[in-house]
Image: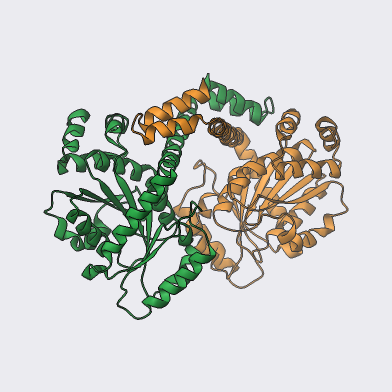
Chain colours: A green, B orange
Amino acid sequence: MQDVSSLVAEAREGRPRAVARLISLVEGASPQLREVMAALAPLTGKAYVVGITGSPGVGKSTSTSALITAYRRAGKRVGVLAVDPSSPFSGGALLGDRVRMSEHASDSGVYIRSMATRGHLGGLAWAAPQAIRVLDAAGCEVIIVETVGVGQSEVEIASQADTSVVLLAPGMGDGIQAAKAGILEIGDVYVVNKADRDGADATARELNHMLGLGASRDAGDWRPPIVKTVAARGEGIDEVVEALEKHRGWMEERGVLAERRRDRAAREVEAIAVTALRERIGDLRGDRRLEALADRVARGELDVYGAADELVAGVTG
Amino acid sequence: MQDVSSLVAEAREGRPRAVARLISLVEGASPQLREVMAALAPLTGKAYVVGITGSPGVGKSTSTSALITAYRRAGKRVGVLAVDPSSPFSGGALLGDRVRMSEHASDSGVYIRSMATRGHLGGLAWAAPQAIRVLDAAGCEVIIVETVGVGQSEVEIASQADTSVVLLAPGMGDGIQAAKAGILEIGDVYVVNKADRDGADATARELNHMLGLGASRDAGDWRPPIVKTVAARGEGIDEVVEALEKHRGWMEERGVLAERRRDRAAREVEAIAVTALRERIGDLRGDRRLEALADRVARGELDVYGAADELVAGVTG
């Protein structure tokens, strides 16, 4: 296997093979990840991360593809991470999406990758920020994280992004669904796609009304805009990019961007630390210390809290 | 508030008010629990814990009531813990059950208590063993833990018991359901209740067939018996008690009882230790250490694993 430092050096030059290899290490929860992340850290923190969520059928992939085109026209390098939290396999479910984005396949300024999250929801929280870091280090100036699926995963994707875009389409009862799914709290920018269809104005109006009742996730003076698009024809996409840039500017001005990134990093660090501590306890189980303590508890010689204290001391001593 | 040592002394004499008060401390996750458990520990380890699970309508409460009668006839003090993992409230959903057990209300040798588990499943793993310890210290020789609800909670109740009884009734499609719910792996004794109804023999036969295909949870030479009862008339209850005693004897002979109790204690101690470590990390968040680390990660000055190492060192140092 290629050593980590040369892999990172190649990824830094934007070589697709090296980027793919590093994301595979993330996906597979490789023991080398620690070394990979240490090597990547100084190269990160420059990319702008956009999350795209929405029910199946609203046009997420088409919108992503149109956004890629717009950003490429502006000369930006773009990375796309399509995450499927419901699938333990990468690629499979996203084959159709890849076809929809195939126009960018030969563009060396675009890197598109689908990623599975090992079949469990928690995997997303682990894998997505690490994969984002790979793309960031590889020089992607804009990273679009798109989710396949609904519900909890949307909220999680939104929490990984600097700016979160919620996509809706007319006639899907999305307006009403929105409140239930809690997406009214996660969107920084709302897009009503397929705006050439009947009911687009009604959907936008209803959404506007509901947004007026609620509050955005950082409850400041940012009022999420609603943009109407026909992504398949590229209509309204420039307005979406404009809304994104405006939100980014607002976040930078108010210090919200740094705050969101710090919060994200804090959750990630905490999760890794808790896992490390759990593993240490697991090691104690291996060397029979926990078993011996449990035996004394079962005999009534020691109470559970006293035993837990000894276990903690064994881990921390 | 009454001090813990006098409360424990009163509970030890079997005073219902003190027992109730201690279980309420468990239910409310009182900060005094540590002191309570330390005081109770030397008084515990004598009770025999029987878990009763089964779908709604199979007759769990009626069977429990009949078992109480049988054990009382043998002169044993009995404790009953009715756990409702789906309800954040204690008592409410179990009112009907209490009525069904009301014949024992005036018997000072029986203590019946319903317990909520704070609305989340994990609460059961915490609260049940502690409540069992209260009843054990109060001199209950047999403790019946009965669950309201299905699925995951059944497996959890079974893991808290020395012997696990799975209740079925004819004509409820339970035989087929059983395999799905995984109850074929958790039962030490199976009871087909309402055996005077059509289909009781078929249910017992189907169950017998399926048990022949699978394996009991300690996959030793114990073959779970199937007992037919009509609990409402007390029929077959002596046979259930006999099966329980036989299982208990088998466990003692093979060392399985001590092993099960040690495993239970180990899981409990581990859960408390992990929570304690998590709380320490939470304290670090309070003193801004995590925030400072996250800030360095967000800036690319430090990688996540390095930050997690520092966090762990802060907890364990």
Total count of labels: 0
Residue A230 drawn above or below residue B236: below
Where the N terminus of chain B falls, by quadrant?
Answer: top right
Provide residue B5's location: percent of width, then percent of height.
Answer: 82, 30
Q: Residue at x 27, y 29 (%)?
A: A39
Q: Is residue A283 visible?
A: no
Q: Residue at x 61, y 39 (%)?
A: B250
Q: Is residue B267 visible?
A: yes
Q: Residue at x 32, y 78 (%)?
A: A197
Side (left or right) of B107 relative to B314: right
In the current view of this chain or complex, which residue is farthest to the bottom? A198
In the current view of this chain or complex, which residue is farthest to the front? A253
Foreground residue among A232 and B314? A232
Residue A193 drawn above or below residue B218: below
Provide residue A277's location: percent of width, then percent of height.
Answer: 48, 30
Side (left or right) of A20 relative to B51: left
Provide residue A126's location: percent of width, then percent of height.
Answer: 38, 42
Side (left or right) of A87 relative to A291: left
In the current view of this chain or complex, which residue is farthest to the left? A106
Provide residue A189's location: percent of width, then percent of height.
Answer: 39, 60
